[in-house]
Image (cartoon, rainbow, N blue to C red):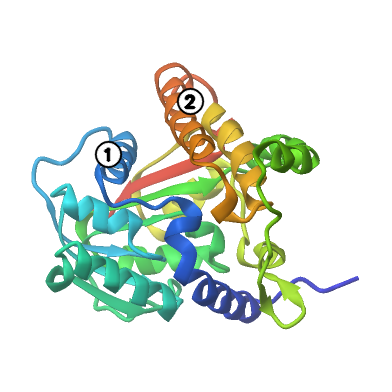
Amino acid sequence: MTAPPTAEEIRDVNTRYHDVAAKDYDAKWGIDFADTGRSQVRMKLEKALGTIPSTPFAHALEIGSGTGYFTLNLMLEGIIEQATCTDISQGMLDALAGNAERLGLGDRVATQVADAEALPFDDESFDLVLGHAILHHIPDLGQAFREFLRVLKPGGTLVFAGEPSRTGDRIANVPKGVAKRVAPAWRAAFRAKPADHISVLIDEPDHSLESVVDVHAFVPSDLRAFARGAGFADVDVIGEELLANWFGWTNRTLEATADPATIPWPWRQYAFRGYLFWQQVDQRFLEGKLPADIFYNLMITARKPA
């Protein structure tokens, strides 16, 4: 029986995986800094906090910033004034810095390679600590939440979105499995060529590393316990996106089997617009009415006591 990876192995693979992924990350995940990306990120923050604050957050710290999707879009929306963006991957931060310069935000964004469990910042430095789809990569979440509390100013806000729920993750395996079975027929119908997967390690394709870099899937009580155990107040966990993720994972699984250059534009438009449609259905009719843990994504918000 193979021993589970150690925390150091997880950090090492996370670094290498995301360094290699950085170049094509925005294209792979459809990351956008125009109207759609800005409205998506604003919607997520408003959903998490209940409302957008009337005054911008003066200085935000993002954990696991990737190429800047969350923070840069919030800055473009006028919700964050100044940001420090951290990641374990220098490759991701290089891509983020390039995006910030291109968007005219370079002088307001600092980048720093940092481990979430040992943040290299002074106590009470930030008004907002945030992240998107990052907590499930961190080995020691108890220590990470203590660090988030330490670097927040009294009364500061914590927001993490896009975290996989344990039940939602299991449910998502159904559309993924169906899509894998029908992928050859789908490629034939759309005349898409099979993908040529590039190896990250010498003998291991990049998609096989996801079982190492994705450490956790959560139930809401897990996230609440980490935040409360660190000393946060006003902790809340909500779920988002159910039908949208069934739709999205089906399409993304199909697309992952094909050479991106050969996927027809009409299909991409269908997948994009369909996702937005089902996202609206989730938001209007399901979110807040069904248990949080059946949704694919969880959001956690909290406040540092004043």
Is tag 2's residue or tag 1's residue first in the polypeptide sequence?
1
**Residue 39, numbered label:** 1
Horizontal and vertical percent position of residue 116? 43, 71
Along the viewing direction, whichever of 180 and 110 lies nearer the viewer:
180
In the image, what residue type sits under mark 1?
Ser
The furthest residue to the left = 55
Residue at 28 percent across and 52 percent down: it is 33
Pointer 2 local density, CA inside 10 Å: few below 14, some 14–19, many at least 20:
some
Q: Which image quadrant: the N terminus? A: bottom right
Q: Quadrant of residue 300?
A: top left
Residue at 27 percent across and 36 percent down: it is 46
Horizontal and vertical percent position of residue 98? 28, 72
Q: Which image quadrant: the C terminus? A: bottom left
Q: CA distance from mark 2 to mark 1?
A: 16 Å
The furthest residue to the right = 1
Q: Is residue 293 above or below residue 144?
A: above
Report how many numbered discs are placed on residues in the image: 2
Residue at 28 percent across and 57 percent down: it is 71
In the image, what residue type sits under mark 2?
Trp
User: Which residue in the structure is indicated by mark 2?
Assistant: 278
Q: Could you tell me which secondary element the residue under label 2 belongs to?
A: helix
